[in-house]
Image (tube, rainbow, N blue to C red):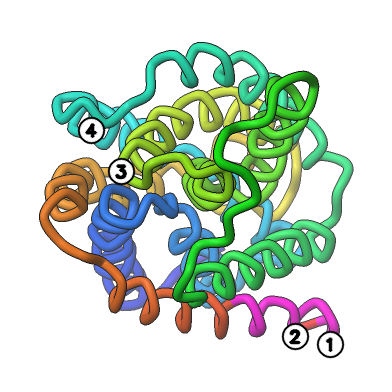
Amino acid sequence: MVYDPSLLIVLALGLLVTGALAGVLAGLLGVGGGIVIVPVLFLLFDALGIAPAVAMHLAVGTSLCTIIPTSISSARSHHKRGAIDVDLLRRWAPVIFVGALGGGILSKFLDASALTLIFGVIALAVSINMAIPKTLVVSDQLPSGPVGAGVLPFGIGGFSALMGIGGGTLSVPVLGAFSFPVHRAVGTASAFGLVIAVPAVCGFIWAGLGVEDRPPLSLGYVSLPAAVLIFSMSVLTAPLGSKLAHSLNPTRLKLVFAAFLFLTALRMLWAVATGG
């Protein structure tokens, strides 16, 4: 497959900008850069003429790869500010890891429409949750027993892997629903990103081995050039987002991002409904 050099330059610049934005959002809002990276990659891969059956898996797998260095950078910054709940991280990390590995393996057996549908539905719910002025509170503490120790972290790990996100998109609102302090939720979620991304990437690499119509320099469902361009910027901007999270009230920015996410989710759901 031969690509127009001018198109490749534009796409490379687009990936750098996407990485910078994703890094800031990962640190600032705790939503995980993947919620931006996946739809952008999906559109860019489509512009390159990559088959729709491959594009969504490639977008998710590549996004997960970028989350590894970004989450390390973001988590280190939050840890310096004492914003990571180490006890919760120790309890949830093993279960999140298993859920993420399961999600990565499951991707091999899901077609592009199913993967896009999962992303679209959850992204739509997240956008609505972000737009609601008052955080939904279910309880004043995290549940104990199987739900708190198993169901919640396993679900966060599994669905995050299938969406190509780092976990903040799901774990921050879940923790907030149980009265977890927002700054500690965002900080701890940044560490969850690494726990999710490593096993999930392994699953997507395995799932994509030998699949045809992938772009050059792809490892399974991971586009290495795209991943490098994105995380080269996201690693630099994640600490900035973390710093802003502790000095700004991001309410207005959340509303703008919620609107963007809402429209993006509708676009992806429309693609599933119409088959294009």
Q: If you read the primary sequence from the N terminus, does the residue marked by circle 2 or circle 4 appear first?
A: 4
Does 267 appear in magenta?
Answer: yes
Residue 216: in sight, yes or no? no
Query: Residue 139 location in percent, x, y?
Result: 62, 44
Q: What crowding class fits label 4: few (fewer than 14 Cα within 10 Å), some (14-19), or many (20 or more)?
A: many
Q: Nearer the viewer, mark 3 or mark 4?
A: 3
Question: Callout 1, which amino acid?
Answer: Thr
Query: Residue 111 location in percent, x, y?
Result: 85, 55
Question: Callout 3, which amino acid?
Answer: His
Contact check, label 2 and label 1, Cβ < 8 Å? yes
Q: What crowding class fits label 2: few (fewer than 14 Cα within 10 Å), some (14-19), or many (20 or more)?
A: some
Q: If you read the primary sequence from the N terminus, does the residue marked by circle 3 or circle 1 appear first?
A: 3
Q: Which residues are magenta?
A: 265-275
The mark found on residue 183 in the picture is 3
- Write down the residue under mark 1: 274
Residue found at x 68% / y 30%: 143
Query: Residue 97 location in percent, x, y?
Result: 62, 21
Residues 252 and 157: in front is 252
Residue found at x 58% / y 61%: 136
Magenta segment, principal secondary structure?
helix
